[in-house]
Amino acid sequence: MSYAIIRNANYKKDNLAGLYKHNERKNKNYSNTDIDKTKSIKNYSIKQCNTTYLNAIKILQKENNLQGRIIKTTNVACELIITSDKDFFENIGEEETKRYFQTAYNFVANYKNLGEKYILSAKVHMDETTPHLHLVFVPVVHKFDNKSGKTVDKIACSEYWKGKDSYKQLQDNFYKYISDNGFDLERGKSKGTKHIDTETLKQITNFDNIKYELANNPIEPINSKNKNLILQQNKGLIEYTKKLKLQLSKSYTAIQRVEKLQNENTNLKYENQELKKENHRLKDYIDKTFEYVSILFDFSKNTLKNLVNNFVKHFER
C-alpha cells in the first residue's frame, strides 16, 4: 500500500529567491541529478506565480492590508511538498494523478480557513523520479479584533502552526481529505514525528523515515532499546550501509575473479551468475533506499549518498 505524503518547510524572505528558482525551473543548471530537463515540459502549474515569491507577498500585503511585523528572522512563507510513491502514480494514470494534485491543492486552500488567494504558487514537477507538488503559501491567520469589531488577516507562521502536534494534525486531515475523495492510500506514522525544517531534514538521515518509505518493500529492520533514539537510528543506518557496501564489494571482487577464470573452469560460470543476482539485489536495495528518501526530502540521490558517507567517516573517526 502507498502512503499519502505531505510535509512542510518554513521560509524567511532571504531564502525565497532560491526556492522560487527551483520550483519555477528558472535555473539553467541543477545540483539535483534526478531532474530530467527533457521532461520539464510536462511540469505544470495549478496556480501560476507571475512574479517572484517575495514580490507576490508584498502585493498581497498591500492589497489585503496584512498585519504582522516582517523582519529578517520572520517566516513569511511555507512550502508543502505533496506526493506518494512512484508505483502509486503509475497505477492510477495521468488523469487521476492530475486529480490527486488538484485535490491536494483544494485541501490546502481550505485548511485552517487559509483562502486560495494566499497560495503563491502550486507547481507539479513531472521531471523527477516521482511526481510531486510544490505548494507555496503565506501563513495567514484570521483573527477577530475586538476594538474594530472586524476580522484582521495577519502573517503569523507560529500561530498558523500553533501547537506541538500541528504537523500531526496536518497529516491526519490531509489523509482524511484524500481518502474521502477516493484515493486508496495509507496514512503515514505519526508517533514521534516532528515538525522540522527542510535544512534539518537534509542533515539528518533518520532510519525510521527510510523504513516508513520502504514499507511496501521492507528490508530487515534494526531493533534498538537505546534511549537516545535518533542517535541509535543513525548508528543503525550507518552499520547497515557499511554491511551493504562490504557485501557489494565482495560481490564485485568475486565477479572479476570469475570473469578471469571462466574459460578454465565451467563450474565457475554458475557461481558468477549467482553472484551477479546477489549483486543486483543489493544494488536494488540501496537504490530504493536512496530513491525513497530523495522523494521525501526533495534532494538528489547523490546528495544522500554523500550524506551517508560523511556519517560513516564521522563515526569511524
Image (spheres, rainbow, N blue to C red):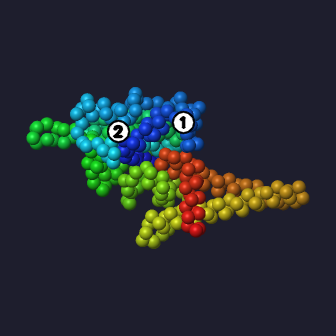
**Amino acid type of disc 1?**
Asp
Disc 1 packing (10 Å; few <14; some 14–19; many ≥20): some
Q: CA distance from mark 2 to mark 1?
A: 22 Å
- Residue for badge 2: 137
Q: Is residue 242 left or right of residue 142?
A: right
- Closest to the observer: 188 or 308? 308
Residue 277 horizontal/vertical position (percent): 70, 55
- Closest to the observer: 86 or 205? 205
Up/down of 152 relative to 41, above or below: below
Residue farthest front in this picture: 72
Residue 167 horizontal/vertical position (percent): 34, 51
**Amino acid type of disc 2?**
Phe
Element class at badge 1: loop
- In which quadrant of the rendered view does residue 243 lie? bottom right
Q: Which mark is residue 32?
A: none
- In which quadrant of the rendered view does residue 115 lie? top left
Q: Is residue 150 visible?
A: yes
- Residue for badge 1: 127
Q: Is residue 104 visible?
A: no
Residue 168 horizontal/vertical position (percent): 34, 53
N-terminal label among 2 and 1: 1
